[in-house]
Structure formats: structure tokens, C-alpha cells
């Protein structure tokens, strides 16, 4: 009786465990379809789910038409693309392994002139990994990582020693970073990334272009480390919050153009650390909107070589901060920026303030010298100390910024951001729905008219 009972138990356990162990193996092999196809032709598989991993070593085009899933079964990468000139499109790639050492990915690329577009890549540790690969196109893919803690997820797109690639129009959710290592002359444009750590992180990567991306609710927007000659233009960066939250950060980076970006609702808008590093170069920051952040610009040290022109600083708790006692940001060139806390006039009506904008370090900025004091920022006692010091200074305050020609109006239209959708609307709206500046009461204008009379 006992042997018979145990045999029944073992049979039942076998049936219970069979689906768990054999579901992926029950899928037909996608590798067999690839091996049987014309190496230079187009493979259009019948709709369904197929077993991976798959290795592609020919210039084949694979079109899933949105009806084909390749499941790696939790082992390795879904597709290894070891060739030149192949195309992968309209596929669903899922269920990679979990090895960071092996960079388990949706697609591992080790070749040139490949196209990876219009795919859905989910539940893969890394999304698309390119190593020593050139002139590839990664376009219009939807990428998400495995549901791990943020630091244990993989990167959405990873470039390592790769050149002249185009990473465009991808939608990225809940991956860790997009990283560019030792790579040059790549275009990263019109991507939408949310819910990650670094939206985009450069390391030792020169002459790349970052254009018209939408980065929202990541810990950091764009961070450039030892990466010279990068163009950062017309990007939207919002809600980079937390202890390390920043819109755009520089670390020992030179000869960078940061133009036309909107940086909103961040802990720190722009962060600079020994940048530019090369004393023979400059960094040029122009026509950026830096608004509604804790600190508009934070300089880690008393540095020089940055040109800040025609930027708009609006609604920041602190416009500019410099870490350390007695340090200043005034060794940089400030010209023609808009400061919403400017208290001067424009009597000749040329759009430029009659007197320079000057920002001093009073008692309300004691936290720059003593970082723990930041906890008390805005407290009544600091407000009283600040008022008394401004009224009758005990010593000459330290000048942080001097802009000789402050603008009376923002050069870049201030965006009112919709919290739910993250979309930006040009222009500032008043409580009655009217655009400010149009048929609205302007106290400064009324004062001028009174003086004229």
C-alpha cells in the first residue's frame, strides 16, 4: 500500500511541475526558422510565440507584423545580432535572463548598419546593448526592464565603444539608465524616458547630439562625465527629484552647448562640477528655461569658463548657489538673462534692466556654507536674520552673480506644465484663463504712465 501511495504522489507532483518546466520548451524554435530562411531575404513568421534565444549571423530582415513573440525562457538574451545589415521590426521580445555580467538583453548587437525598430521589449534585464557597433538605427521601440529595485534593473539602451548610431523616438519606462560609454558621434533624439534613474548618462563620450528628448520623473535628466563637445538642445526635463535630483549635470566636461532646454520642477536645475575642465574652452548655456526648482543652478566650486546668456530663471526657491564659504559664480559670464526676482526698472523701455542684476549671499543662504542648515531653509528665524542683514549688514555680503544686462521679459516662453500628462503649454496663464501680458493689469506699466504724467 505504501509504495502504491508514494507512486501516486510522485505522479501528481510530476503533472503539477510539468507546465512550469516545459512551457517555454513547448514553443517552436525561432532559431530553426532563421536557419531555414534566405540569409538575405525577409522572414515573416506565422503569428505566435516562439522560443529563444536566437542568434542571427546574416543580413536578414525579420518582420513580426506585431503578431510574433520571442520568449527567451529566462536564459540569456532574446536575440544575439552578430552581423551587419540586418533588420528586426514589429517583434515582441521578452523574458531574458537576469545576469548583469552577461548583459542579458532584448537584443545584443555586435555589428554595423543594423536596424532595430518598432519592437516591444519587456521583462528583459537590459533593453538593447550595442558594443563596438557602428551606424545602427534603434528607432520607435518600447522598452522596459524587469520589475526589480531600481539599481538592480538593466539599462534601456547601452552603447559601449560604438559610433555613429541613431537612437531615436523610443519610449522607455522603468529601466535603470540609458548609458553611453567611450562612444562618439551618436544621435540621441526624441526619446521619451520615465521612471528610471539616469535618463541619459555619458562617460568619456565626445561629440554626441542630444536633441528634443522628453525626460520626466527620473532621478537625473542628463549627466555628462568627461564628455566634451556634446550638443544638448531643445530637451524637456522635469521632476528630477530626490537627494540626487538634477536636470542637467556636468562633471569635468568641456566645450558643451546647452541650448533651448526646458528644465522644470527639479531638485537642482543645472549642476556644474569643475566644468569646463579644459581651461582653453567654454561651456555655452543659452536660451534655457530653468523654472520651479529648488536650486536653479548649483556650482560645486568656484569655477570659471561658462557663458550663460539669454536664459530664463523663474520660480526657483534659490536662483544660483555655490557650495563652500566665500565662493562665487561670478567668474563666469552672465549676460542678458531673465530673473524673476529682479527688482529694477526699465525706464528707457529697451527691454533691458537699467541696473545690473546682483545676487548676494545673505543669511538666508547660510546653508551653502553649512549644508545641514538646509533643513531650516525658510524657517522664520532665518527669515528674520536675512531681513536684518539686508537692512543693516554686519559685513559685506558675498556677491554670487552679476548680470550686467538683465532682461525684463523671459526670452523663452515660460511653460506651465500639466502635472498629469507632462505636456507643456506655451505662455503663462492667469487664474481667469487669460494669458498674462494680454489685457492684464501691469503695475509696472501703470507706474511708468503715472511718472510720465
Image (cartoon, rainbow, N blue to C red):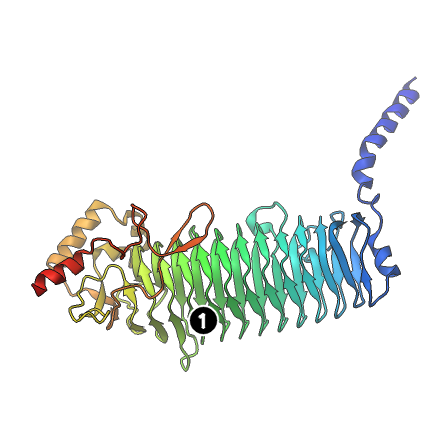
Instruction: Residue 297 in the image: state x and y as whole percent.
Output: 35, 62
Q: Is residue 59 visible?
A: yes
- Number of residues whose C-alpha sits closer than 10 Å to that of mark 1, classed few (under 14), some (14–19) or many (20 or more): some
Left or right: 245 as drawn, with respect to 313: right
Q: Secondary structure at mark 1?
A: loop
Q: Nearer the viewer, residue 164 or 268?
A: 164
Instruction: Residue 274 in the image: state x and y as whole percent.
Output: 40, 70
Task: Point out the residue furthest to the left here.
Answer: 453
Q: Nearer the viewer, residue 422 or 335?
A: 422
Residue at image location 73% in from the left, 48% down from the top: 74
Residue at image location 30% in from the left, 74% down from the top: 331
Q: Which residue is mark 1?
A: 252
Quarter holding residue 23: top right
Above or below 357: residue 32: above
Quarter holding residue 58: bottom right
Task: Point out the residue furthest to the top here.
Answer: 1
Left or right: 266 as drawn, with respect to 54: left
Instruction: Residue 91 in the image: state x and y as whole percent.
Output: 72, 54
Q: How many marks?
A: 1
Quarter holding residue 369: bottom left
Instruction: Residue 224 in the image: state x and y as whole percent.
Output: 49, 67
Amino acid at each position: 500500500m505504501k509504495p502504491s501511495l508514494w507512486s501516486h504522489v510522485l505522479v501528481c507532483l510530476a503533472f503539477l511541475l510539468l507546465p512550469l518546466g516545459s512551457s517555454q520548451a513547448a514553443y517552436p524554435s525561432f532559431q530553426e526558422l532563421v536557419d531555414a530562411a534566405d540569409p538575405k531575404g525577409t522572414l515573416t513568421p506565422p503569428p505566435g510565440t516562439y522560443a529563444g534565444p536566437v542568434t542571427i549571423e546574416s543580413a536578414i530582415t525579420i518582420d513580426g507584423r506585431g503578431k510574433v513573440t520571442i520568449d527567451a525562457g529566462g536564459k540569456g538574451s532574446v536575440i544575439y545580432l552578430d552581423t551587419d545589415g540586418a533588420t528586426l521590426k514589429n517583434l515582441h521580445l521578452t523574458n531574458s535572463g537576469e545576469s548583469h555580467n552577461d548583459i542579458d538583453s532584448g537584443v545584443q548587437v555586435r555589428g554595423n548598419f543594423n536596424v532595430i525598430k518598432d519592437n516591444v521589449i519587456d521583462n528583459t534585464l537590459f533593453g538593447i546593448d550595442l558594443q563596438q557597433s557602428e551606424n545602427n538605427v534603434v528607432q520607435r521601440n518600447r522598452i522596459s526592464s524587469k520589475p526589480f529595485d531600481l539599481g538592480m534593473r538593466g539599462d534601456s539602451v547601452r552603447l559601449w565603444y560604438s559610433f555613429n548610431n541613431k537612437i531615436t523616438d523610443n519610449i522607455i519606462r522603468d529601466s535603470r539608465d540609458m548609458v553611453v560609454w567611450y562612444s562618439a558621434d551618436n544621435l540621441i533624439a526624441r526619446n521619451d524616458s520615465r521612471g528610471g534613474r539616469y535618463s541619459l548618462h555619458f562617460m568619456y563620450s565626445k561629440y554626441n547630439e542630444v536633441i528634443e528628448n522628453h525626460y520626466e520623473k527620473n532621478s537625473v535628466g542628463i549627466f555628462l562625465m568627461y564628455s566634451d563637445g556634446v550638443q544638448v538642445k531643445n530637451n524637456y526635463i522635469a521632476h528630477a527629484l530626490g537627494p540626487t535630483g538634477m536636470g542637467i549635470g556636468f562633471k569635468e566636461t568641456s566645450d558643451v552647448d546647452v541650448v533651448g532646454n526646458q528644465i522644470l520642477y527639479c531638485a537642482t536645475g543645472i549642476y556644474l562640477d569643475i566644468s569646463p575642465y579644459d581651461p582653453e574652452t567654454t561651456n555655452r548655456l543659452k536660451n534655457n528655461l530653468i523654472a520651479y526648482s529648488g536650486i536653479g543652478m548649483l556650482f560645486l566650486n568656484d569655477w570659471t569658463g561658462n557663458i550663460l546668456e539669454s536664459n530664463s530663471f523663474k520660480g526657483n526657491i534659490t536662483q544660483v548657489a555655490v557650495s563652500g564659504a566665500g565662493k562665487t559664480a561670478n567668474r563666469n559670464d552672465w549676460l542678458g538673462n531673465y530673473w524673476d526676482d529682479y527688482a529694477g526698472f526699465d525706464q528707457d523701455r529697451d527691454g533691458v534692466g537699467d541696473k545690473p542684476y546682483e545676487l548676494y549671499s545673505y543669511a538666508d543662504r547660510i546653508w551653502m556654507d553649512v549644508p545641514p542648515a538646509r533643513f531650516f531653509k525658510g524657517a522664520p528665524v532665518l527669515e528674520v536674520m536675512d531681513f536684518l542683514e539686508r537692512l543693516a549688514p554686519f559685513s559685506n555680503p558675498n556677491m554670487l552673480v552679476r548680470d550686467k544686462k538683465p532682461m525684463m521679459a523671459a526670452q523663452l516662453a515660460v511653460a506651465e506644465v500639466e502635472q498629469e500628462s507632462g505636456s507643456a503649454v506655451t505662455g503663462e496663464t492667469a487664474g481667469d484663463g487669460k494669458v498674462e501680458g494680454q489685457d492684464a493689469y501691469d503695475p509696472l506699466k501703470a507706474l511708468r504712465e503715472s511718472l510720465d504724467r
